[in-house]
Image (tube, rainbow, N blue to C red):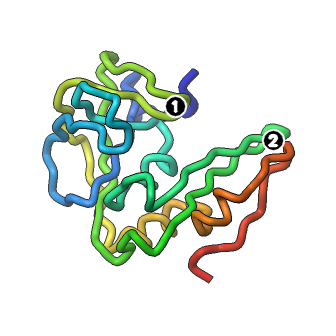
Amino acid sequence: MIYGNYFLEDSNKRILYHASPVQGLKEIEPRRDHINPKVKQACVYASPNKDYAACFGGRWHDDIGTLSVFTSNGKRKLYFGLTDKIDITKPCSLYEIIDDGTGLAVNNYEIAFTHSMKVHKETKYKSFKDMLIKNNINVTSKEEMDNFKFTGEVPNFNNYFD
């Protein structure tokens, strides 16, 4: 099940979000998955969840961050655990694309497309940090995330930017 449904006004077309450290894109082209080298097919990854997608606005690889979505008693809280290996001062963009119905669910929050996707709208951010803050991402340290043991309650981690 994919969580999140955002539709264009007066339309049944679903908006998906894709974040990138590259600004000014008119079309998003499939890329090899540098997080999971076992994935052989180049894809465009997008999410119906703006906050989830925004976490990928930096140059992502496994040793720079941990992303977790916690749900307890109907409450959903997304946490992004950062390290100092990512430059949060670099500009980035959050792109809206229209779901054409050809994507495959990767997990509960991502859809993968094997073809290029046209950009419907771009929101530019002066920095990755700005993107995370403006999209209400709960940011903590990767170390704190990696050491956390889920007990059924939504955690309340320290804020990375404090």
- Is 66 positioned to the left or the right of 23 in the image? right
Query: Which of label 2 and label 1 is nearer to you?
Result: 2
At 45% from the left and 26% from the top, the residue drawn is 106
Q: Residue furthest top?
A: 102
Residue 93 x, y percent position in the rendering: 29, 59
Residue 58 x, y percent position in the rendering: 35, 61
Q: Secondary structure at mark 1?
A: loop
At 56% from the left and 58% from the top, the residue drawn is 80
Foreground pick, 62 / 137:
62
Q: Label 1: which residue?
A: 5
Q: How many marks?
A: 2
Foreground pick, 100 / 162:
162
At 57% from the left and 79% from the top, the residue drawn is 161
Give the mark nearest the N terminus, 2 or 1: 1
Q: Secondary structure at mark 2?
A: strand
Categorize mark 1 by other alpha carbons within 10 Å: few (<14), some (14-19), many (20+). few
Q: Are marks 2 and 1 in contact (CB under 8 Å)?
A: no
